[in-house]
Image (cartoon, rainbow, N blue to C red):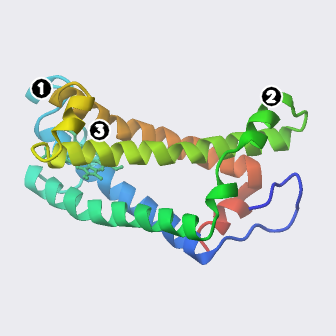
C-alpha cells in the first residue's frame, strides 16, 4: 500500500497477500479457541480449580477435542506463515513492507499526523511476526520436549514455557484490536476492505 500522505488512490492488495492474511485470521481463531480448551483442562493460572475460560471462547468440547483441533490447525497456521515468508522473500516485499528507519524518523520528527499514524501502523503490523514466531517456538517446545529440551531450558522450566505460550493469546488479541484501529485510521474502511476483497 502507498502512504496515504502520498496517494489518494483506492488501496489495492495482491491476491496472494489477501489469501495469506485471511488464512492467518482463520488459523489464529482456531489456534486461540482450541488452545483455551486445552488450557481449561489444567489451568496454568491457579491449577484445576483456578481461572477457567468460558466455553463460548473454546473449541473442541474437551481436552482431547481441543488438542485435535490445535494440532490440526497448527499445520494450516505454520505452513501459511512459511508460505508467506517464502512469498515476501522471493518477491522482495520484505524490503519495504515492514517497519524501517523512515518510520522511526517520522515518529521522531514529522508534523504530519497522517504520516505519524502510518508509521505506527507499520510498527504494529510488523510486531505480529515475532509474536507468531514465539508462539511456534514455544509450541514446538511443548509438543516435542524430549526432542527439543533446549527450548524448555531457554524459558527456565515447563511452567514458564506454558505461560509464555499462553501469552500469545492476549498478545494476539491486543494486536488485532490495535491493528484494526490503526489500519482504519491510516486508510479508512477502504484499506480494511482491500485486505479481504
Ligand atoms: C499462534 C498461535 C497459537 C496460540 C494462540 C496457541 C495457544 C495455546 C494455548 C492457550 C494453549 C494452552 C496452554 C496451557 O494451558 O498449557 C496451548 C497449548 C499447546 N500448544 Fe499452542 N498455540 C498456538 C500455536 C501453537 C503451535 C504452532 C504449536 C506447535 C508447534 C502449538 C502447540 C501446543 C502444545 C503442544 C500445547 C499443549 C498441549 C497439551 O498439553 O495437551 N501451539 N496453545
Q: CA distance from mark 2 to mark 3?
A: 34 Å
Q: Is residue 146 left or right of residue 93?
A: left
Expressed as whole percent of the image width and height from the top left, the position of residue 151 reads 24, 38
Q: CA distance from mark 3 to mark 1?
A: 17 Å
Q: Which mark is residue 108?
A: 2
Quadrant in which the N terminus is drawn:
bottom right
Q: Nearer the viewer, mark 3 or mark 1?
A: 3
Q: Nearer the viewer, mark 2 or mark 3?
A: 2
| Residue pointed to by mark 3 | 165
| Residue pointed to by mark 1 | 47
Residue occupying image coordinates x 29% and y 51%:
33
Badge 2 crowding class, 10 Å Cα cut-off, few under 14, some 14 to 19, many 20 or more, is few
| Element class at badge 1 | helix
Q: Is residue 147 left or right of residue 165?
A: left
Q: Is residue 138 left or right of residue 188?
A: left
Q: CA distance from mark 1 to mark 2?
A: 46 Å
Q: Nearer the viewer, residue 166 or 57?
A: 166
User: How many circles with numbers are drawn on the protein?
Assistant: 3
Point out the tag, 1 or 2, that comes first from the N-terminus.
Answer: 1
Point out the tag, 3 or 1, that comes first from the N-terminus.
Answer: 1
Residue occupying image coordinates x 18% and y 57%:
60
Q: Residue furthest bottom?
A: 15
Q: Nearer the viewer, residue 116 or 103?
A: 103
Amino acid at each position: 500500500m502507498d502512504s496515504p500522505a502520498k496517494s489518494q488512490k483506492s488501496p489495492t492488495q495482491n491476491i496472494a497477500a489477501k489469501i495469506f492474511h485471511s488464512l492467518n485470521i482463520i488459523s489464529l481463531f482456531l489456534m486461540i479457541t482450541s488452545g483455551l480448551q486445552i488450557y481449561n483442562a489444567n489451568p496454568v493460572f491457579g491449577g484445576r480449580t483456578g481461572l477457567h475460560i468460558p466455553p463460548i471462547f473454546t473449541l473442541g468440547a474437551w481436552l482431547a477435542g481441543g488438542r485435535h483441533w490445535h494440532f490440526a490447525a497448527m499445520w494450516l497456521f505454520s505452513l501459511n506463515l512459511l508460505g508467506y515468508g517464502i512469498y515476501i522473500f522471493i518477491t522482495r516485499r520484505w524490503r519495504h513492507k515492514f517497519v524501517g528507519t523512515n518510520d522511526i524518523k517520522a515518529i521522531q520528527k514529522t508534523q504530519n499526523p497522517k504520516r505519524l499514524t502510518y508509521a505506527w501502523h507499520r510498527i504494529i503490523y510488523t510486531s505480529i511476526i515475532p509474536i507468531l514466531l514465539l508462539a511456534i517456538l514455544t509450541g514446538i517446545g511443548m509438543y516435542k520436549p524430549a526432542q527439543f529440551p533446549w527450548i524448555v531450558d531457554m524459558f527456565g522450566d515447563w511452567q514458564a514455557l506454558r505461560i509464555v505460550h499462553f501469552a500469545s493469546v492476549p498478545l494476539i488479541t491486543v494486536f488485532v484490536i490495535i491493528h484494526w484501529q490503526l489500519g482504519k485510521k491510516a486508510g479508512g474502511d477502504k484499506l480494511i476492505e482491500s485486505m479481504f476483497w
